[in-house]
Amino acid sequence: MKENEFLEIMTGAYEYAYKSVEYVRPVFVFISTIVSYLLFPNEAYVAPTIGLFVALILDLATKYYAISMQNGGFRNAIITRKISSESMWRGTKKKLVSVLMVMICCGLFMRFTEFLPQIAIAITSICYGFMFFRETQSIAENLIDAGHTDMAWFLILVKKKKKEFMEDNDISEGNDSK
């Protein structure tokens, strides 16, 4: 093998490795693989997770909407600093971290109790159900704060179903503010 051929092979290998790192983003793939492993121990977790994240997004959107309606519109709420990225991010970050931690714990519970999958599924269903009820209640409260008093029936219904859900699963509400 000539020196030029070896140099061409090594240059080609380097270019291939560089392009694979540049376009595939192995760090992103590694992180998304770990998250997927933790959050989705089986395919049954995908739909509830999507539903919960949609509820989180709706909660955030209705919060912005409620603050806007209470302060003369979105633009005015921003001008008066009622809506600021810092204040909204603080609350959103806390909620996201707490929801993700519960979801990861549920995923780990499923992974490490494979010999008792029914118990893991039941506990995970309770956790996801409770988190979904909380988000739905918060959405209804935000809409009522925005002036949609016609949604009071929905809030009453959600609170009632949440209470029934908690009683059926022997859960105490503790320090729940919403």
Image: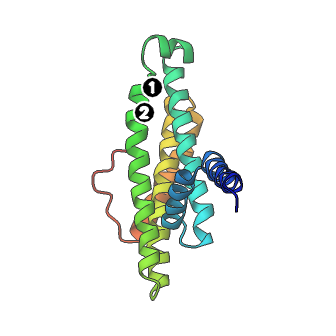
Q: Amino acid at mark 1?
A: Ser
Q: Amino acid at mark 2?
A: Trp
Q: Nearer the viewer, residue 131 or 152?
A: 131
Residue 2 point in image, percent of width and height: 70, 58
Residue 111 point in image, percent of width and height: 46, 76
Does 163 appear above or below 66? below
Residue 148 point in image, percent of width and height: 57, 31
Residue contact at pointers 2 and 1, CB within 8 angstroms: yes
Residue position for label 2: 89
User: Which disc, if any, is residue 16?
Assistant: none
Left or right: 19 in relation to 178: right
Left or right: 32 in relation to 159: right
Can residue 73 be spotted in the picture? Answer: no
Can residue 56 be spotted in the picture? Answer: yes
Quadrant in the picture for the C terminus: top left
User: Residue shown at 53%/13% (left/top)?
Assistant: 72
Could you say whether the residue bearing mark 2 is in a helix, strand or loop? helix
Q: Nearer the viewer, residue 59 or 161?
A: 59
Q: Quadrant of residue 112?
A: bottom left
User: Which disc, if any, is residue 85?
Assistant: 1
Could you say whether the residue bearing mark 1 is in a helix, strand or loop? helix
